Amino acid sequence: MLIRPRRLRRTQAIRDMVRETRLAPSMFIYPVFVREGKNIIEDIPAMPGQKRYSPDKLPYILEQAAKKKIGGVLLFGIPEHKDECGSSAWDENGVIQQAIKISKKEFPALTVIGDVCLCEYTSHGHCGLIKNNSVDNDSTLEILSRVAVSQASAGADIVAPSDMMDGHTLAIREALDANNFQDTLICSYAVKYASAFYGPFREAAGSAPAFGDRKAYQMDPGNIREAVKEAQLDIQEGADLIIVKPGLPYLDVLKTVKESVYVPVASYSVSGEYSMIKAAAQMGWLDEKKVALEAAISIARAGADIIISYFALDLAGEFY
């Protein structure tokens, strides 16, 4: 006897009970831009609804993150002073270090992640030191290690190197261990593509490269086997968690990487993804909240354990 499969009429309670992919506030990480100065809360035109905060104003947004019980915050620093080597990035009194200290003082239970990169801090906007008009991988590793140690010293629970230099995870792990920060975790941007979806972020952080592009050290969007290799290498070097970035355009990559590694995998739903949804919603072309939720579910369905999203606070507050 042939049994015809049925789509049963289900109540909302039953649909919730049998749902295969579930979201929770603790899965979400909220990225926050912190700029040097005082008494600053300013809009980011390319990212409606997102703002830059000076360190003294940071508790305003951190309180919302803590109340909604999201997994944590990812802090990006925007200094007033930039130079060729990005020295503000490891200044013990730098903007990111101030932000981390305030975050842990005011909300000690909130997980604080520091972005480890140089692009926001260098005058040329690249993620590493420049030699002969190109990024020099090996000399950059020492600088990145200093940045990571300075953030750990300020109280960061996790450091997240986003530079895509070869060997950065090992260099940072060794530096953290040598400075008695064995418990500081590394969440590596192991799989970071040279994507056009980063445009709004670069405006928000003032991190667009002054010359050339980042294709020499970020990944080719056409490659997927390389993503598995990069993820496995970073794990071998000591990464506790890894990130696949961007999110929605790379769900196939996320799924493949997730099936190939044994550590938690995060997906970064980047600024371009956020701004597209916002722009379409402002035009009345789609329902912002429903689309943001559906996008997050698709990322979780593809395998993400953690979702880094500018919608994190909205999702945690509205959909659980």
Image: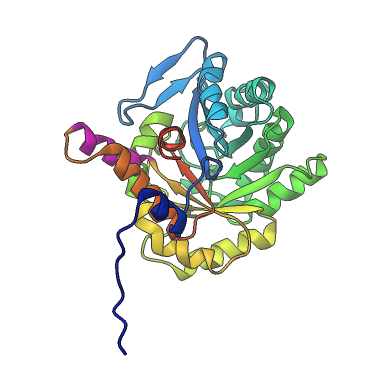
Q: Nearer the viewer, residue 286 or 165?
A: 286
Q: Nearer the viewer, residue 14 or 39?
A: 14
Residue ID at (66%, 54%): 239
Residue ID at (34%, 42%): 292
Residue ID at (49%, 60%): 303
The quadrant of the picture occupied by the N terminus is bottom left
Residue 262: where, in percent of width, then height? 63, 64
Quarter where residue 221 is shown: bottom left
Q: Residue furthest bottom?
A: 1
**Number of numbered discs:** 0
Quarter where residue 20 is shown: bottom left
- Magenta segment, principal secondary structure? helix
The stretch drawn in magenta includes residue 276? yes
Q: Nearer the viewer, residue 53 or 319?
A: 319
Give, as a single range, the part of the protein colored magenta: 271-282
Residue 114 seen in render? yes
Q: Seen in the image, is 165 located left or right of residue 235?
A: left
Q: Nearer the viewer, residue 213 or 157?
A: 157
Residue 247: where, in percent of width, then height? 41, 51
Residue 164: where, in percent of width, then height? 53, 51
Residue 246 seen in render? no
Residue 203: where, in percent of width, then height? 36, 31
Color encoding of the figure: rainbow
Residue ID at (21%, 41%): 286
Image height of 162 relative to 301, above or below: above
The stretch drawn in magenta includes residue 27? no
Q: Seen in the image, is 83 located left or right of residue 112?
A: left
Q: Residue furthest top?
A: 39
